[in-house]
Image: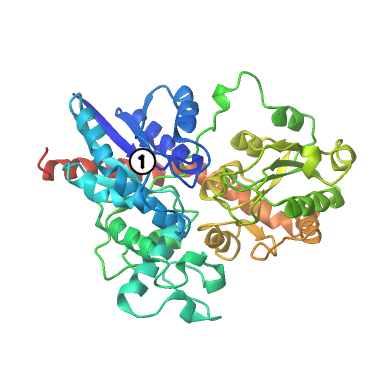
Amino acid sequence: MKSAVVLYSASSAGHLIPMVSLAKLFHEHGFSATVITFNHPLISSKADQEVSHLSSANPSISFHVLPLITAGESYANLQPPDVTRIIVQAQNKNLQNIILDLSKTSCVRVIVLDSICTDALDAARQLSIPTYFFMLFGASAAAFFLNLLELDVSSSLSLKDFGNDPINFPGLPPILTSDCPIFLIDRESCKAVMQASRDLVKSDGILMNTFESLEPKAISALREGLCAPSFNMPPVYSIGPLVTERREKEMEERHESLKWLDLQPKCTVVFLCFGSLGGFSLDQIKQIAIGLENSGHRFLWVLKLNTEHRNFFNKSIPEFELGQILPEGFLNRTKDRGMVVKTWAPQIQVLHHESVGGFVTHCGWNSILEAVTAGKPMVCWPLYAEQWLNKIFLVDHDTRLGVVMEGYDKDMVVAEEIEAKVRWLMEGEGSELLKERAKAMMDKAAESLRITGPSSQAFMQFLIDMEKQNLSKTKI
């Protein structure tokens, strides 16, 4: 029977797309790959829609969407990690059944779980198949979560007990409590994350979508077991950057944003895009528009509306027309140097376009890797989840590939700050060093993926270790 892998992912684009990148890597090494996903009640896009797009663009990979489960309890007062736990637990039997069916025609060599699907670990291991996690955020964020687990088991402290004092964790720069996601601040609200971290260290290993040159200290701390010394740390493999195209192959013709970029001078356009969940209120949209207009620079802005301020899991987002939500006359006044597109643009192709000189980003890990592989400097505007932590690692740590958009942690980022940061990035002398570092990191990213590069070698070592795990397990 053909050797197969099963990859289990949450349904949002930010999770499915890198998981598909990993599936393609397995396929290149001779495995058949099946990606399994499920609908999430807090995510507006349906799993079937995402899978349809990805399946048509990746015919070598099989996809399966688990049947919809409606849990009996309300999600209204729960944090997103708690909701995910409930859904994953409810789907465990369905997941097992799909893998058992697949095992009738293929030899399943490994199960790879999305790092937010930790509650599927026990269900997967009951099948006596090696089970690994794929981290969909960076090594620095992973190191933070495991350090937090160590704090949880070795003391009575929580993050809020540090007050204004910096938190010093192995492998990481000093971190303030104010930089941490709100659901990690006290012991009660971070229970789901702590349980997820416990499951991570119980797995057969952890695959990281990062590379040695980008996060050397965090990767080293993870491998050496410094982040959670009270636990037996499984092997860690940094196999990135895994970056794949997002639906571009489906397009019958070139996207309008790329055609517009073709007409712009080299390195003159600032690109603003905030991920699949990154919508803004009307007031914030107007501040962005004013800042861009006053900056005088060319821009490409992917705009998403969110009617609930800072509720990034809002599912009831209405249809809108650009002219109705942007300042009166904005589109006409900036038509010769700016373009606004609704909802989506082919981000990887945009970032690799020679006209783009900088990137204003929400600091989602996929977007960071896409900017790094394109050699583009970043203005960091984190919105939710671990993105605030990613900002620290990009701005304050050794990599220094970005600058911060001040006010990201307040109710509103004002137009004056947006104007100032765009001007600094596109014309300031101080940004030249940032751009040089971005170009150098791009070269290191490419080097890591060469056949003799550290990421390629790490994946080969993972395959060897995976087969050793198979030999040690009694098959079902």
Tell which residue pokes out farthest to the left in this image. Answer: 474
Q: Is residue 244 left or right of residue 359?
A: left
Dot 1 corresponds to which residue? Answer: 69
Q: Circle 1 — which element?
A: loop
Q: How far from the left and from the top, in percent, is residue 289?
A: 80, 49
411 or 416, which lies in front?
Answer: 411
Tell which residue pokes out farthest to the top in this image. Answer: 252
Q: Is residue 434 above or below residue 359?
A: below
Q: Is residue 374 above or below residue 245?
A: below
323 or 379, which lies in front?
Answer: 323
Q: How far from the left and from the top, in percent, is residue 238?
A: 39, 49
Hey, what amino acid is under mark 1?
A: Ile
Residue drawn at x 56%, y 44% as measured from the top left: 315
Quadrant for the C terminus, please. top left
Residue drawn at x 20%, y 46% as measured from the top left: 125
Q: Is residue 209 left or right of residue 350?
A: left
Q: How far from the left and from the top, in percent, is residue 342?
A: 69, 36
Residue drawn at x 32%, y 68% as measured from the top left: 228
411 or 30, which lies in front?
Answer: 411
90 or 336, which lies in front?
Answer: 90
Residue 119 in view (yes/no):
yes
Q: Is residue 197 above or below residue 278?
A: below
Q: Is residue 61 above or below residue 146?
A: above
- Few, some or many residues within 10 Å of mark 1 (<14, 14–19, 20+): some
Quadrant for the N terminus, please. top left
